Image (cartoon, rainbow, N blue to C red):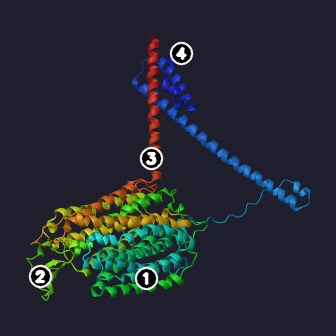
Amino acid sequence: MPNESSDSFVPDDLASSPLQSPSSAAVVSTSSTEADIVSHNHGRSNHEKNSILSQIISLSTSNGRLQQQLQFEKQKATSLSADLRDAAERIVELEKEEWTAGSDKPSEAVLLPPEPPQEPPQEPPKPPPEEEDMKGWGFRDPRLRPFVIISIAYLLFTVTDGAIRMIVLLHAYHKSFSALQVALMFTLYELAGVFTNLAAGLMGAKWGIRFTLIVGLCLQLLSYGLLFGWQDGWSDETAIAYVTVAQMFGGIAKDLTKLGGKTVTKLVTPEGKDTRLFRLVSLLTGWKNSLKGVGYFLGSALLEVSYELALGFMMGLIVLALPFAIWGLDAELGTAKKKNSSFKEIFVWDNFNLNVLSLARLFLFASRDFWFEVPLPFFLRSPNCDVLGPDFPCTPDQDPTACDDGSTCDPSLSFCANINTGGGCGGPGVGRTVVGAFLGGYIILYGQIQSWTPQLVTGPLGQTPPNKMTEVFWGMINCLPTMIAAIAVYVSPAFTEHRLGGMTAWLIVIIVTFAVVFAINSSIHSYLVVKYAAADKVAVSVGLYYMSNALGRLMGTLGSGFLYTYAGGEVNAIGGYDPGHDATLGLAACFVAGTVSSLLAAVITIWIRDEESGLKCGPCLTLVAPKEVVEVEEGKEEMEEEDIRKRDLAERTVENIEVGEAKRLE
């Protein structure tokens, strides 16, 4: 009767809890035994009750461990059984081989108990890919020959690609085209990149990288040749249409050539060599952008001498690059190993990470082109608004320095006027060579930081090879330079009061800071795209990715032309003379658009499924723990929660035993 009374007070959750397995049964039976002890020794001290509670918890924990050990032994027995079964099958096969090797019937020797089979000598295990000896992986190594040849042609082409933008932009500025009109001239240049990257991926996969490289170089020659036909007497509409078509061939050429430069790094890098791949990609993209900066400066400097000289010099560089592409590459390099993709397959919707990265790339490059490609050179060329108009008379035969930089002595007006009212006023008014040096310096710095990102940035921070968490981190930082720039241009006296020294200092700090941060982001992006791409269809995968790159540049270029031209508003007429719109406010609006675009790129990157390695910020600081560590920590938390649950259950059991004993005594 007492036992029935005690059992009736066992809580319901104990009977239905997971502990009511063999281990939990032990807890219940132990609880009944402890009930007898409590019943016999009623009135003992609380110290003895706590001792009983500890015994219950210990028994429960020991029982759980026994169950885990039993499960482990079962797994070992299963594995051993499989090994024995494999050995038995091997013995049967050996007996069959002996029977068939002799007569049709087994001989007496065969019927004797077979000797244990001799295990074949085991070869020493091959080292994993990350431990493979990579000695001799210099630029003379035959495995790197395609990389070296394509890089030479690609880098020579890059000089001409940077130069063509500055030649067209600064020549158009001198002819009084507005920022929006110049942006329209580059529309087909960028739009051609969108469709070229689609077709280039298919062309590279079918005909090889050599074919796309040769076609790209020839189209660049055609683009420069057409620019020779730009006539001064044409109307604005005719000139815009003609230059836009000429630029279109340059855009196609750029993306066909870029395809070879980007995909060859994946093709010459062994599987598992992610760190080496990151370094190759960073090296190529870094030097590519540095030489593009050289092209910016050369195009601007040669333009000061002669428009025709600038075009002819760049065509010579293209001719120099052609022999490397024609005679130095295998025609099969970069072709698809099995089946070429179709236009439907080129979007690779099953590669989730690549698609998300492509969308992020769109906004990342738009964040730069919203203020860099058109607004910044226009602002640098624009003169001070306060030194224009009838208050500053001049004569054409007067000293050229009579008017400030960026302005000219208009013979029809006899006073200093803006060279290009469509470009606005309010900037430092520097010459074309200085503009080229400004933008070229940015590109060179950007390229060198990109080349040394693994060694100088991500390596010391423990972020090599990078993953999506690395890009999110640097993507958020990428928002800061343009946000600070927008605030400075809006409110700083250096811009509002046109203090040339302060304005120049602000622009240098903004450009250098953005160049460093953007280079790190671009280097990480360039690595991630080849990491996520399929090895046998890397040309197609990279083509899709750079299609979004071109689309982002198109969005940034058109948006910048519109914002710079119309966001600032018109400056008050000076003595009846209209100097143009406020270039300072127009540039600030472009910085705001760039900040928003950077933020969108970082947020989109969060969707990528690539966080296994976590995120470090130096040897002592881990911002996001690796996935394995997180899983271990979660397992520890689950074990702690299970221990707490068992303790609570044991405490309730003891309480119910005491209550049952008290009722029994009553």
**Residues at badges 3 and 2 in contact (C-beta under 8 Å)?**
no
Which callout, 4 or 3, points at the residue further toward the start of the chain?
A: 4
Which callout, 3 or 1, points at the residue further toward the start of the chain?
A: 1
Cα–Cα span, label 4 and label 3: 44 Å
Which callout, 1 or 2, points at the residue further toward the start of the chain?
A: 1
Report the front residue among 27 and 422: 422
Q: Give the residue drawn at x 10%, y 71%.
A: 574
Is 12 placed above or below 472 here? above
- Which x, y percent locates residue 148? 49, 79
Residue corresponding to mark 3: 633
Which callout, 2 or 4, points at the residue further toward the start of the chain?
A: 4
User: Tag 1's secondary structure?
Assistant: helix
Quarter placement of the N terminus: top right
Q: Residues within 10 Å of mark 2 (few under 14, many from 20)?
A: some
Residue 602 visible in this rendered orientation of the protein = yes
Q: Residues within 10 Å of mark 4 (few under 14, many from 20)?
A: few
Residue corresponding to mark 2: 414
Quadrant assignment, res 527: bottom left
Q: Give the residue drawn at x 26%, y 81%.
A: 433
- Which x, y percent locates residue 565? 24, 67
Residue corresponding to mark 4: 4
Is 194 placed above or below 418 here? above
Mark 3 is on which residue type? Glu
Cα–Cα span, label 2 and label 4: 117 Å
- Residue lying farthest to the left in this orientation: 391
Residue 221's tag is: 1
From the image, state whether disc 2 or disc 4 is nearer to you: 2
Which callout, 4 or 1, points at the residue further toward the start of the chain?
A: 4
Mark 2 is on which residue type? Ser
Mark 4 is on which residue type? Glu
Report the front residue among 111 and 252: 252
**Residues at badges 4 and 1 in contact (C-beta under 8 Å)?**
no
